[in-house]
């Protein structure tokens, strides 16, 4: 029994590499929100999804950790291959999957608990009870999220008392605490001021050394600043996907160029 | 364990899928239990139907349904028995209808004042008064009607000792809080931009309130009136104690509405046999009327809440035929009521035209109109307030002399000076505990299932409707349920257990609604965050939703229990008034505070009426204490909460 568990745990820490999306389709009721998207997301790079509101970029992001399962009436087809597994498959349990594919939401959403408990929560539900290990995880996560210097001396305070930018970095730390491989960010800076945004962007640059980061953003300058690859979405379709430099400087599609130059959107 | 969190890379190809979906036994078991808790409502509803039908079968073996439904004479106890239910129906409609004619305008006026004119400070004073009025058990209203209002009509208008008008007046006041709270919600829900638009074109606040807000909230106001009507039709204790036991059509004389007759069966006034089982037949008619009107009202309320959803429109088409028929029957009454109202209204217009020929109102006149209007609507609140003060003053002045150590520690007795309520208080306390033991897990479990786990499918909607409609069943029908189903069919006897079960079912919808509100108040972002870091659904609920909803849930639970221990009619069949000892087990006979109040107010000796008033004081103190605890919990939670 115990031995079995070990093997599984090793499985879950296996290095999985690139994400390969294959003909992903998403329906919300009658609305065809994502149409036939296929793309290869490289590991340990930052990939940005851009496009006008309602183009489906957030929906696609939420496919990758199966958060769309939580929405009533949302149906996902297609495949996302990751380390030899189709994570959209019926036999995949989203609960352990989300341990390896973390998510940071648009609005900072810390739990109404202390800073410490916010970060320790997920390791605890995954079975860690040892206080010294939890302490280490909390410290390491906060340091990795560039928040330790600011809140390290008040871990017992309520997370609701932090500033918006601190709350968002706390949410990132909370995600890092479960040692994911992929971090999904759904417009993580849209509710933040420019200074807080700059801090998060610096952090993303750090994070890509260890993690695959996929970020949805409305802000094209942000995509240009932080991402290595960019996918442009329009009306549920992936119009163009390439190196960020190429997309911004010399797009292949006219639609992309129109969007970049602000002619619509 | 540290090993688990090392990021050691595993070399070599691993064929196994680490995310493989496993059967999570714990999770599935919990969801199944919650599902069962929610589904129990179907069983309870079925038990109520079974009770009514099984109890009425002996009656319909002797009396044909046609004679019963169309007969114009109701003589249950003479040698020639006649069972025509129409006189009872008419008396029910007269009492509920007249009470509504008084209570509805007062209630709607009060809600206009509260929603449109009252300052936040006034609101914060008036709202608790209305809640207090809503929290007073009907037995207390009945006592007040019998001892205070009825003598007034006897002395000044030559009314009989038992008369319908006293019952009607207190029922009117009793349904006011229902109408106020729902109408107020409906008017508060009218979007503010409508008010602003109206004010911006130069309307006064009064014109805005009556010409813009009220029409926009009309369906909610209508629903509140329907729910008040259903309450009036189902009210038992007041008509049983005050309105007398004889069919009649004079407001100053006794009347016998349906609930009054069933109450008489419950108290043993009717000899066993046909007149006894006739109670069940009458209960079927009462059930259909109250249930139909209530579900119509509840449906309107629901429609307002989900006005934008497309799905509800689709559902409209799929309404089943039975429900439609019930609704049609109940809407006939509604139509008659509206007809009367509209006739009055159109004539009002003529009168107004007669007094003042069509001319433009000057600004001064419009302001006067506003002043008079606000004066009128605010006076309805004063009426409710005065009523409450007089009621409390009367009860206290009557009963305070009876409260002493002997009263609190002795047993009920034939001698008023020796009588006490010790076993009665214990009976109520035990009853409350048993009710909590059943109502809390079932109600909270059902709410968690409905709010956190249920998919929006036909079964879920069916469950919701069933639970919601439990709230529309007259309390005396619950009395029949306890008597026939729990006491006899299940063999629990006239015991605390039977009574506790009945009360739990009765308060179930209140617990479910309160719990769901508390769960809904927890932001979805908490759920999303928890799911995002890999919590299961139950872990999300257990770690994040429940802790944050707990104050709301416990507040709702305490308020439901305070409602339960104030109820008389549901346990009318079951209590044993002559219990000499406090109950020692759940299968023991018992008596409870409201039942003892009922028993003593019916007593011939006036000394016992004092004891009844003293018992009311004790009951009110307990209820007030529970409400205070609920308020403290709520306020402390609000002060502590940082989201």
Image (cartoon, coloured by chain):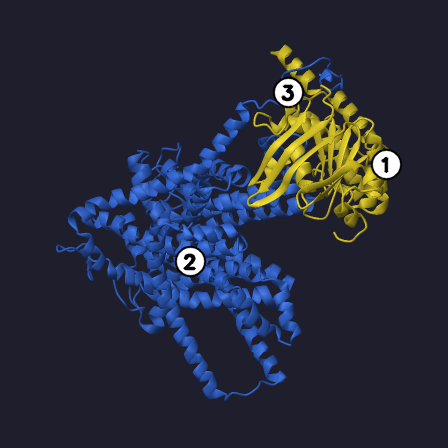
Chain colours: A yellow, B blue
- The quarter of the picture where residue B139 lies is bottom left
Mark 3–mark 2 Cα distance, whole angstroms, equals: 66 Å
Q: Position of residue B624 (x, y in %)?
A: 53, 50
Kindly identify which residue carries mark 1.
A202
Residue drawn at 51 percent across, 58 percent down: B182
Name the subunit of mark 2.
Answer: B
Tag nearer the camera, 1 or 2: 1
Mark 3–mark 1 Cα distance, whole angstroms, equals: 33 Å
Query: Considering only vertical position in the picture, is B245 above or below A58?
Result: below
Closer to us: A225 or A207: A225
The answer to whether the residue labelled 3 contacts the one labelled 2, judged by CB atoms less than 8 Å apart, is: no
Q: Residues within 10 Å of mark 1 (few under 14, many from 20)?
A: some
Q: Answer with mark 3 or mark 2, whichever residue precedes in sequence.
A: 3
Q: Is residue B76 visible?
A: no
The answer to whether the residue labelled 3 contacts the one labelled 1, judged by CB atoms less than 8 Å apart, is: no
Q: Where is residue B411 in the image (x, y as percent from the top left)?
A: 39, 42
Mark 1–mark 2 Cα distance, whole angstroms, equals: 70 Å
Query: Considering only vertical position in the picture, is A84 above or below B452?
Result: above
Kindly identify which residue carries mark 2.
B141
Mark 1 lies on a secondary structure that is helix
Name the subunit of mark 1.
Answer: A
Question: From the viewer's perspective, is A223 left or right of B85?
Answer: right
Residue B18's label in the rendered image is: 3
Q: Is residue A262 visible?
A: yes
Q: Position of residue B198 (x, y in %)?
A: 62, 72
Q: Quadrant of the C terminus of chain B?
A: top right
Closer to us: B592 or B230: B230
């Amino acid at each position: 029994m115990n031995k079995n568990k070990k093997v599984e745990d090793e499985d879950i820490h296996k290095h999985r590499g690139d994400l390969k999306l294959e003909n992903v389709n998403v329906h919300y009721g009658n609305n065809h929100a994502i149409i036939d998207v296929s793309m290869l997301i490289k590991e340990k790079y930052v990939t940005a999804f851009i496009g006008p509101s309602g183009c489906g970029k957030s929906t696609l992001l939420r496919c990758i950790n199966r958060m769309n399962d939580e929405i009533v009436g949302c149906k996902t087809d297609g495949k996302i291959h990751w380390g030899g597994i189709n994570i959209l498959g019926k036999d995949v349990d989203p609960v352990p999957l989300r341990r390896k594919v973390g998510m940071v939401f648009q609005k900072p959403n810390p739990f109404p608990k202390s800073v410490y408990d916010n970060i320790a929560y997920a390791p605890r539900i995954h079975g860690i009870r040892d206080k010294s290990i939890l302490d280490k995880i909390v410290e390491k996560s906060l340091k990795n999220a560039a928040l330790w210097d600011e809140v390290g001396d008040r871990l017992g305070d309520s997370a609701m008392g932090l500033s918006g930018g601190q709350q968002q970095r706390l949410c990132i730390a909370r995600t890092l605490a479960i040692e994911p491989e992929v971090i999904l960010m759904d417009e993580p800076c849209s509710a933040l001021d420019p200074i807080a945004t700059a801090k998060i962007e610096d952090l993303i640059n750090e994070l890509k050394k260890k993690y695959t980061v996929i970020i949805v953003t409305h802000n094209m300058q942000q995509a240009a600043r932080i991402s290595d690859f960019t996918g442009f979405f329009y009306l549920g379709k992936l119009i163009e996907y390439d190196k960020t430099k190429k997309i911004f400087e010399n797009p292949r599609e006219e639609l992309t160029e129109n969007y970049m130059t602000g002619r619509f959107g | 364990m540290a090993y688990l969190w090392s990021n050691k890379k595993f070399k070599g190809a691993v064929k196994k899928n680490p995310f493989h979906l496993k059967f999570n036994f714990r999770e599935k078991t919990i969801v199944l239990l919650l599902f069962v808790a929610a589904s129990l409502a179907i069983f309870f509803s079925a038990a109520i139907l079974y009770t009514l039908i099984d109890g009425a079968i002996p009656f319909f073996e002797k009396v044909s349904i046609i004679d019963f439904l169309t007969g114009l004479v109701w003589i249950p106890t003479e040698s020639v028995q006649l069972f025509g239910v129409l006189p009872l129906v008419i008396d029910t409609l007269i009492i509920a209808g007249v009470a509504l004619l008084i209570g509805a305008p007062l209630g709607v006026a009060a809600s206009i004042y509260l929603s449109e004119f009252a300052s936040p400070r006034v609101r914060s004073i008036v709202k608790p008064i209305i809640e207090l009025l809503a929290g007073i058990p009907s037995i207390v209203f009945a006592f007040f009607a019998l001892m205070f209002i009825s003598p007034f009509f006897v002395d000044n208008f030559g009314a009989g000792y038992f008369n319908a008008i006293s019952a009607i007046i207190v029922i009117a006041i009793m349904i006011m809080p229902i109408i106020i709270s729902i109408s107020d919600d409906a008017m508060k829900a009218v979007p503010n931009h409508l008010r602003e638009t109206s004010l911006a074109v130069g309307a006064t606040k009064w014109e805005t309130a009556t010409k813009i807000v009220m029409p926009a909230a009309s369906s909610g106001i209508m629903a509140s009136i329907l729910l008040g009507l259903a309450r009036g039709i189902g009210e038992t204790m007041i008509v049983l104690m005050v309105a007398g036991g004889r069919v009649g059509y004079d407001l100053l004389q006794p009347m016998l509405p349906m609930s009054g007759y069933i109450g008489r069966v419950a108290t043993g006034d009717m000899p066993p046999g046909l007149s006894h089982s006739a109670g069940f037949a009458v209960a079927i008619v009462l059930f259909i009327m109250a249930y139909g009107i209530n579900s119509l009202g509840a449906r309107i309320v629901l429609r307002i809440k989900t006005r934008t959803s497309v799905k509800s429109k689709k559902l409209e088409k799929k309404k089943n035929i039975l429900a439609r028929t019930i609704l049609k029957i109940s809407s006939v009454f509604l139509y008659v009521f509206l007809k009367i109202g509209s006739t009055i209204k159109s004539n009002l217009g003529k009168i107004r035209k007669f007094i003042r020929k069509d001319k433009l109102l000057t600004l001064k006149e419009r302001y006067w109109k506003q002043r008079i209007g606000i004066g009128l609507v605010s006076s309805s609140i004063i009426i409710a307030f005065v009523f409450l003060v007089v009621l409390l003053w009367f009860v206290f002045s009557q009963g305070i002399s009876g409260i002493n150590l002997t009263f609190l520690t002795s047993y009920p007795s034939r001698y008023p000076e020796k009588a006490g309520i010790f076993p009665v208080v214990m009976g109520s306390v035990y009853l409350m505990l048993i009710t909590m033991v059943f109502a809390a897990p079932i109600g909270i479990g059902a709410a968690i299932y409905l709010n956190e786990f249920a998919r929006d499918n036909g079964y879920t909607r069916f469950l919701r409707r069933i639970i919601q409609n439990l709230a529309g069943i007259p309390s005396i029908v619950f009395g029949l349920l306890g008597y026939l189903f729990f006491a006899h069919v299940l063999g629990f006897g006239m015991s605390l257990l039977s009574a506790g079960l009945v009360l739990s079912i009765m308060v179930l919808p209140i617990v479910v609604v309160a719990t769901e509100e508390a769960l809904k108040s927890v932001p979805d972002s908490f759920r999303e965050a928890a799911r995002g870091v890999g919590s299961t659904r139950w872990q999300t609920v257990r770690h994040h939703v429940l802790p944050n909803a707990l104050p709301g849930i416990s507040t709702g639970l305490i308020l439901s229990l305070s409602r339960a221990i104030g109820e008389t009619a549901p346990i009318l069949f079951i209590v044993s008034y002559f219990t000499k000892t406090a109950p020692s087990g759940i299968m023991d006979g018992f008596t409870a505070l409201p039942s003892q109040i009922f028993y003593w107010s019916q007593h011939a000796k006036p000394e016992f009426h004092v004891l009844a008033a003293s018992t009311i004081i004790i009951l009110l103190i307990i209820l007030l204490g529970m409400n205070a605890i609920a308020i403290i919990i709520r306020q402390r939670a609000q002060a502590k909460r940082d989201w």
